[in-house]
Amino acid sequence: MHTLSRLVILAGAALCCSAGPALAQARLPTIPPASYTPEQRQAAADFEAARKVPVFGPFEPLMYSPQVMTQARAMGDYLRYKSAIGTTLSELVILVTAREWTQDYEWYVHYPIALKAGIKPAIADAIADGRQPVGMSDDEEIVYDFSIELHRYKRVSDTTYARAEKRFGKQGVVDLTGVNAYYTLLAMQLNMAQYEPPKEAKRLERFPK
Protein backbone atom coordinates (compact mmCIF):
# COMPACT_ATOMS: atom_id res chain seq x y z
CA MET A 1 0.00 0.00 0.00
CA HIS A 2 1.51 3.35 -0.99
CA THR A 3 2.31 6.11 1.50
CA LEU A 4 -0.71 8.33 0.78
CA SER A 5 -3.13 5.43 1.29
CA ARG A 6 -1.47 4.62 4.61
CA LEU A 7 -1.81 8.26 5.69
CA VAL A 8 -5.50 8.31 4.75
CA ILE A 9 -6.18 5.10 6.70
CA LEU A 10 -4.32 6.37 9.77
CA ALA A 11 -6.09 9.74 9.63
CA GLY A 12 -9.45 8.06 9.32
CA ALA A 13 -8.74 5.74 12.22
CA ALA A 14 -7.67 8.65 14.41
CA LEU A 15 -10.84 10.60 13.65
CA CYS A 16 -13.06 7.61 14.27
CA CYS A 17 -11.45 6.89 17.61
CA SER A 18 -11.40 10.56 18.65
CA ALA A 19 -15.16 10.83 18.16
CA GLY A 20 -15.58 8.96 21.44
CA PRO A 21 -18.35 6.53 22.29
CA ALA A 22 -21.06 6.18 19.70
CA LEU A 23 -23.96 8.53 20.26
CA ALA A 24 -27.32 6.98 21.05
CA GLN A 25 -29.57 7.03 18.02
CA ALA A 26 -33.35 7.21 18.18
CA ARG A 27 -33.99 5.04 15.13
CA LEU A 28 -31.13 2.56 15.00
CA PRO A 29 -29.26 2.76 18.32
CA THR A 30 -25.66 1.56 18.25
CA ILE A 31 -25.65 -2.09 19.22
CA PRO A 32 -23.35 -2.84 22.20
CA PRO A 33 -20.82 -5.51 21.19
CA ALA A 34 -21.95 -7.63 24.14
CA SER A 35 -25.37 -7.85 22.49
CA TYR A 36 -24.15 -8.91 19.05
CA THR A 37 -25.62 -11.99 17.43
CA PRO A 38 -23.10 -14.54 16.10
CA GLU A 39 -23.45 -13.00 12.61
CA GLN A 40 -22.85 -9.51 13.98
CA ARG A 41 -19.79 -10.69 15.94
CA GLN A 42 -18.32 -12.16 12.76
CA ALA A 43 -19.10 -9.01 10.77
CA ALA A 44 -17.48 -6.85 13.47
CA ALA A 45 -14.40 -9.09 13.58
CA ASP A 46 -14.04 -8.97 9.81
CA PHE A 47 -14.44 -5.20 9.89
CA GLU A 48 -11.70 -4.72 12.48
CA ALA A 49 -9.38 -7.10 10.65
CA ALA A 50 -9.80 -5.08 7.44
CA ARG A 51 -9.95 -1.53 8.81
CA LYS A 52 -7.84 -1.88 11.98
CA VAL A 53 -10.49 -0.07 14.03
CA PRO A 54 -13.77 -1.23 15.60
CA VAL A 55 -17.08 -0.70 13.83
CA PHE A 56 -17.86 3.03 13.64
CA GLY A 57 -19.95 5.67 11.92
CA PRO A 58 -22.21 4.47 9.09
CA PHE A 59 -21.32 0.86 9.82
CA GLU A 60 -23.02 1.06 13.22
CA PRO A 61 -26.57 1.32 11.84
CA LEU A 62 -25.58 -1.14 9.11
CA MET A 63 -24.84 -3.71 11.85
CA TYR A 64 -28.59 -4.34 12.02
CA SER A 65 -28.02 -6.15 8.71
CA PRO A 66 -24.55 -7.64 9.18
CA GLN A 67 -24.33 -9.10 5.68
CA VAL A 68 -25.08 -5.71 4.13
CA MET A 69 -22.50 -4.14 6.45
CA THR A 70 -19.85 -6.67 5.46
CA GLN A 71 -20.52 -6.27 1.74
CA ALA A 72 -20.49 -2.47 2.07
CA ARG A 73 -17.23 -2.57 4.01
CA ALA A 74 -15.63 -4.82 1.38
CA MET A 75 -16.67 -2.48 -1.44
CA GLY A 76 -15.24 0.44 0.51
CA ASP A 77 -11.94 -1.37 1.02
CA TYR A 78 -11.39 -1.04 -2.71
CA LEU A 79 -13.19 2.18 -3.60
CA ARG A 80 -11.74 4.29 -0.81
CA TYR A 81 -8.16 3.03 -0.81
CA LYS A 82 -7.41 1.41 -4.18
CA SER A 83 -9.65 2.92 -6.86
CA ALA A 84 -8.31 3.73 -10.31
CA ILE A 85 -8.73 7.48 -9.75
CA GLY A 86 -6.46 7.54 -6.69
CA THR A 87 -6.97 8.49 -3.06
CA THR A 88 -6.86 12.27 -3.41
CA LEU A 89 -9.54 12.46 -6.10
CA SER A 90 -11.63 9.90 -4.22
CA GLU A 91 -11.65 12.24 -1.24
CA LEU A 92 -12.86 15.06 -3.48
CA VAL A 93 -15.73 12.82 -4.59
CA ILE A 94 -16.56 12.03 -0.97
CA LEU A 95 -16.78 15.74 -0.11
CA VAL A 96 -19.09 16.36 -3.06
CA THR A 97 -21.26 13.42 -1.99
CA ALA A 98 -21.41 14.55 1.64
CA ARG A 99 -22.42 18.04 0.49
CA GLU A 100 -25.05 16.86 -1.98
CA TRP A 101 -26.62 14.63 0.71
CA THR A 102 -26.02 17.20 3.49
CA GLN A 103 -24.34 14.44 5.50
CA ASP A 104 -22.64 16.02 8.50
CA TYR A 105 -20.87 12.92 9.81
CA GLU A 106 -19.45 12.05 6.40
CA TRP A 107 -18.18 15.62 6.07
CA TYR A 108 -16.79 15.62 9.62
CA VAL A 109 -14.72 12.51 8.97
CA HIS A 110 -13.55 13.26 5.44
CA TYR A 111 -12.89 17.01 5.42
CA PRO A 112 -9.58 16.71 7.33
CA ILE A 113 -8.66 13.54 5.43
CA ALA A 114 -9.23 15.33 2.12
CA LEU A 115 -6.94 18.17 3.20
CA LYS A 116 -4.23 15.70 4.24
CA ALA A 117 -4.63 13.97 0.88
CA GLY A 118 -3.97 17.26 -0.97
CA ILE A 119 -7.33 18.92 -1.57
CA LYS A 120 -6.96 22.68 -1.05
CA PRO A 121 -9.00 24.12 1.85
CA ALA A 122 -10.52 26.75 -0.45
CA ILE A 123 -11.85 24.01 -2.74
CA ALA A 124 -13.30 22.01 0.15
CA ASP A 125 -14.85 25.11 1.69
CA ALA A 126 -16.47 26.12 -1.60
CA ILE A 127 -18.03 22.66 -1.85
CA ALA A 128 -19.34 23.01 1.72
CA ASP A 129 -20.94 26.33 0.79
CA GLY A 130 -22.50 24.89 -2.37
CA ARG A 131 -20.29 27.04 -4.60
CA GLN A 132 -18.39 26.04 -7.75
CA PRO A 133 -14.74 25.83 -6.57
CA VAL A 134 -12.13 27.89 -8.37
CA GLY A 135 -8.49 26.98 -8.77
CA MET A 136 -9.05 23.26 -9.27
CA SER A 137 -6.56 21.17 -11.21
CA ASP A 138 -7.70 19.65 -14.50
CA ASP A 139 -8.19 16.27 -12.80
CA GLU A 140 -10.16 17.81 -9.94
CA GLU A 141 -12.38 19.71 -12.37
CA ILE A 142 -13.14 16.52 -14.33
CA VAL A 143 -14.00 14.60 -11.17
CA TYR A 144 -16.03 17.47 -9.71
CA ASP A 145 -18.10 18.00 -12.87
CA PHE A 146 -18.71 14.26 -13.29
CA SER A 147 -19.81 13.86 -9.66
CA ILE A 148 -22.03 16.94 -9.62
CA GLU A 149 -23.83 15.80 -12.75
CA LEU A 150 -24.39 12.33 -11.29
CA HIS A 151 -25.82 13.68 -8.05
CA ARG A 152 -27.90 16.53 -9.43
CA TYR A 153 -29.01 15.27 -12.84
CA LYS A 154 -28.78 11.48 -12.26
CA ARG A 155 -26.74 11.07 -15.45
CA VAL A 156 -23.51 12.30 -17.04
CA SER A 157 -23.37 14.33 -20.25
CA ASP A 158 -21.43 13.08 -23.26
CA THR A 159 -18.93 15.91 -22.92
CA THR A 160 -18.24 15.25 -19.26
CA TYR A 161 -18.05 11.50 -19.79
CA ALA A 162 -15.61 11.87 -22.69
CA ARG A 163 -13.27 14.03 -20.61
CA ALA A 164 -13.34 11.53 -17.75
CA GLU A 165 -12.79 8.49 -19.96
CA LYS A 166 -9.95 10.17 -21.84
CA ARG A 167 -8.19 10.97 -18.56
CA PHE A 168 -8.97 7.92 -16.41
CA GLY A 169 -9.98 5.19 -18.86
CA LYS A 170 -13.02 2.93 -18.72
CA GLN A 171 -12.04 1.42 -15.37
CA GLY A 172 -11.58 4.93 -14.06
CA VAL A 173 -15.08 6.08 -14.97
CA VAL A 174 -16.54 2.91 -13.42
CA ASP A 175 -14.54 3.49 -10.23
CA LEU A 176 -15.41 7.20 -10.20
CA THR A 177 -19.08 6.32 -10.41
CA GLY A 178 -18.54 3.63 -7.79
CA VAL A 179 -17.04 6.05 -5.25
CA ASN A 180 -20.00 8.38 -5.74
CA ALA A 181 -22.42 5.49 -5.36
CA TYR A 182 -20.70 3.96 -2.33
CA TYR A 183 -20.63 7.18 -0.34
CA THR A 184 -24.20 7.91 -1.39
CA LEU A 185 -25.15 4.54 0.12
CA LEU A 186 -23.43 5.48 3.39
CA ALA A 187 -24.96 8.97 3.37
CA MET A 188 -28.43 7.55 2.80
CA GLN A 189 -28.00 5.10 5.68
CA LEU A 190 -26.73 7.83 8.01
CA ASN A 191 -29.53 10.24 7.06
CA MET A 192 -32.17 7.53 7.39
CA ALA A 193 -30.83 6.52 10.81
CA GLN A 194 -30.52 10.19 11.89
CA TYR A 195 -26.96 9.39 12.95
CA GLU A 196 -25.52 12.35 14.83
CA PRO A 197 -21.91 13.51 14.45
CA PRO A 198 -19.97 14.72 17.51
CA LYS A 199 -21.06 18.07 18.95
CA GLU A 200 -17.96 19.82 17.62
CA ALA A 201 -18.64 18.72 14.04
CA LYS A 202 -19.43 21.30 11.37
CA ARG A 203 -23.09 21.35 10.37
CA LEU A 204 -23.48 21.79 6.65
CA GLU A 205 -25.99 24.40 5.61
CA ARG A 206 -29.32 22.93 4.61
CA PHE A 207 -30.30 23.56 0.99
CA PRO A 208 -32.46 25.00 -0.40
CA LYS A 209 -32.44 27.94 1.97
Image: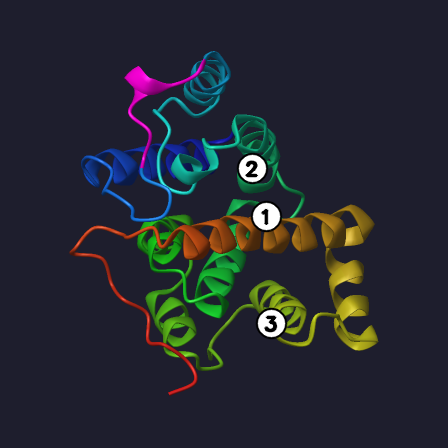
Q: In terms of sequence position, does the residue under pointer 2 or pointer 3 come before the other?
A: 2
Residue 157 lies within the magenta run: no
Depth check: give the residue in front, 98 or 164.
98
- The residue carrying mark 3 is 148
Identify the secondary structure beneath mark 3: helix
Q: Is residue 1 visible?
A: no
Q: Residue at x 39, y 67 (%)?
A: 124
Span colored in magenta: 30-37
Q: Residue at x 29, y 46 (%)?
A: 25
- The residue carrying mark 1 is 182
Q: Is residue 37 above or below residue 146?
A: above
Image coordinates of residue 177 in percent, x first then y, are 69, 55
Query: Counting other residues with Cα less than 10 Å from the Cα at mark 1, is it few (<14), some (14-19), or many (20 or more)?
Result: some
Which amino acid, by three-letter code, is at mark 3?
A: Ile
**Location of residue 191 (image quadrant):** bottom left
- The residue carrying mark 2 is 76
**Location of residue 89 (image quadrant):** bottom right
Q: Residue at x 46, y 32 (%)?
A: 64
Identify the secondary structure beneath mark 1: helix
